[in-house]
Amino acid sequence: MFVIGNLLRAIAVTLRSFIYIEIVSIVISVIFSWVMPYYYHPVRRFFDSLSSLVLNPIRRFLPPIGSIDISPMIAIFALLFLDEFLVETLFDLAVRLS
């Protein structure tokens, strides 16, 4: 059973890393949208493409309110919830199976 426990732990660590990378890319993308008005800068496009994985589905259901886009805030809260719920559950299962 320790093999399944190690597999679940590896999945949890990978998922947590993905969640943190997404949160950082969303924050950097938001900061760049305030500071760097030139959209075609390669660094900004890179972080926008990373953050669009999570933000585009939210923007489909929740359009911007006036000129304010609250989808980054909702995405960060959802990612933090997934980290606390799903990743911690996987870690607990991995510990019990080890």
Image: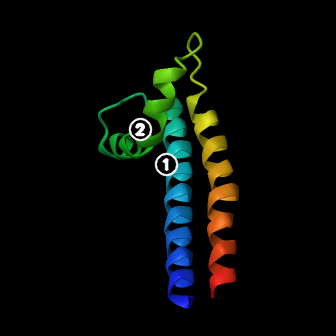
Label 1 environment density (alpha carbons within 10 Å; few <14, some 14–19, many ≥20): many
Q: Position of residue 50 (x, y in %)?
A: 40, 46
Q: Of the residues under marks 1 and 2, which one precedes in the sequence? A: 1
Do we see residue 36 in this rendering? no
Residue 94 lies in quadrant: bottom right
Residue at x 56%, y 77% (from the top left corner): 9
**Number of numbered callouts drawn:** 2
The residue positioned farthest toward the front in the image shown: 1
For mark 1, what is the residue? 25
Q: Position of residue 72 (x, y in %)?
A: 57, 35
Three-letter amino acid code at the position of disc 2: Ser
Residue at x 65%, y 74% (from the top left corner): 93
Taking 84 as reference, is 66 left or right? Answer: left
Vertical placement of residue 20 versus 96, above or below: above
Residue at x 48%, y 35% (from the top left corner): 55
Circle 2 sits in a helix, a strand or a loop, which is it? Answer: helix
Taking 77 as reference, is 55 left or right? Answer: left
Quick one: quadrant of the C terminus?
A: bottom right
Circle 1 sits in a helix, a strand or a loop, which is it? Answer: helix
Numbered mark located on residue 52 in the image: 2
Residue at x 49%, y 68% (from the top left corner): 14
Q: CA distance from mark 1 to mark 2?
A: 9 Å
Quick one: quadrant of the N terminus?
A: bottom right
**Of marks 1 and 2, the one in the foreground:** 2
Q: Position of residue 36 (x, y in %)?
A: 44, 33
The residue positioned farthest toward the top in the image shown: 66
Do we see residue 33 in this rendering? yes
